[in-house]
Amino acid sequence: MPRIDALLRDARLRLPDGVEADLLLAHVLGCSRTWLFTHAQDELDADTSAAFAALLERRERGEPVAYLTGERGFWRFDLQVGPATLIPRAETELLVELALARLPNVGPMRLADLGTGSGAIALALAFERPHAQVIATDMSGEALAIASSNARALSLHNIAFRQGDWFAALTGARFDLIASNPPYIADDDPHLAEGDLRFEPASALSSGIDGLDAIRLITAQAPAHLLPGGWLLIEHGFDQGAQVQALMRAAGLVGVETVRDLELRDRVTLG
Ligand code: GLN
């Protein structure tokens, strides 16, 4: 019977990022990564090592780790994800931080997350601002099922999910803050055929010949859905900052600026 440390040593050599082997084995065993290290000398039974070997093979063929384990860490949570949702990215935590910096710590407020996917942004805002009412929209019913299951798992009751395209699912009410991490990659960008992107929903990734179709629509319609003094925050590609700023100004938004991510690339524009 193979020992945990021997299995992990071999598996780490087969994957580009060693931590992935730990995540996959922890998933098979239903344990934490830390548990693996404190039980490194335990032997695994044949079924468990076969299940791990199967996941390793799927990973070697390119399937994202998050889809193999069904979860991804975002903000303070482990979120359930699936092929119907984008895998939340660390960059999107920047958008959450920028949003929180513009919201009072207490008191009622109305927030919206357009194209919520797994619910990443909406859940983080609802968690950090328990007195806020958060509306999260997505056109994908499958994504909304995952997002609402995440909300239940986190016992967040101040969030409601609506199915529909961008603003179509929001009726009437205006918001103190609207956030979105929409698809922003150009339809013909060769990166769509690489890495995790190959397995993620195209509708969550690409948006027109310049990637800006969704952002054009969101920026044009946002002012009609914002309360006076309200904020719009949009995540976008590293080379789209100037264009998104221009779109926001054309829509009449003020205080427009672009903020860079940890890799010093333009990532979020707000106004
Ligand atoms: N809002 C979700 C996220 O940030 C989904 C984004 C998307 O599918 N484009 O992960």
Image: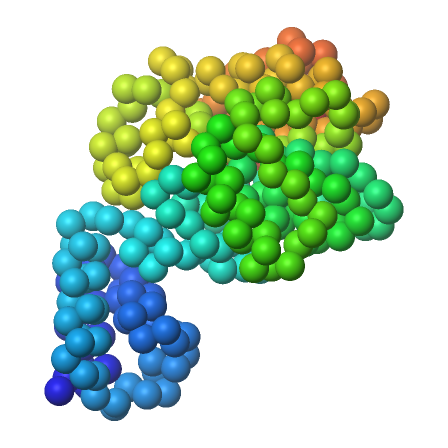
- Residue positioned most to the bottom: 41
Residue appearing at x 51%, y 40% in the figure: 144
Q: Is residue 38 above or below residue 85?
A: below
Q: Quadrant of residue 237?
A: top left
Give percent across and percent down for residue 208. 39, 15
Q: Residue 258: where, in percent of width, then height? A: 60, 29
121 up-or-down from 270: above or below: below
Q: How is the image coloured?
A: rainbow
**Residue at the location (72% across, 12% down)?**
252
Residue displayed at 21% across by 76% down: 48
Percent position (x, y) of residue 147? 52, 46
Asked whether, in this view, residue 74 is left or right of residue 271, the answer is left
Q: Is residue 31 left or right of residue 126?
A: left
Residue at 28% x, 31% y is 192
Total number of numbered labels?
0
Q: Where in the figure is residue 140, as x and y percent of width and height?
A: 45, 32
Residue 23 falls in which quadrant of the image?
bottom left
Q: Is residue 155 above or below residue 179?
A: below
Closest to the observer, 74 or 94: 74
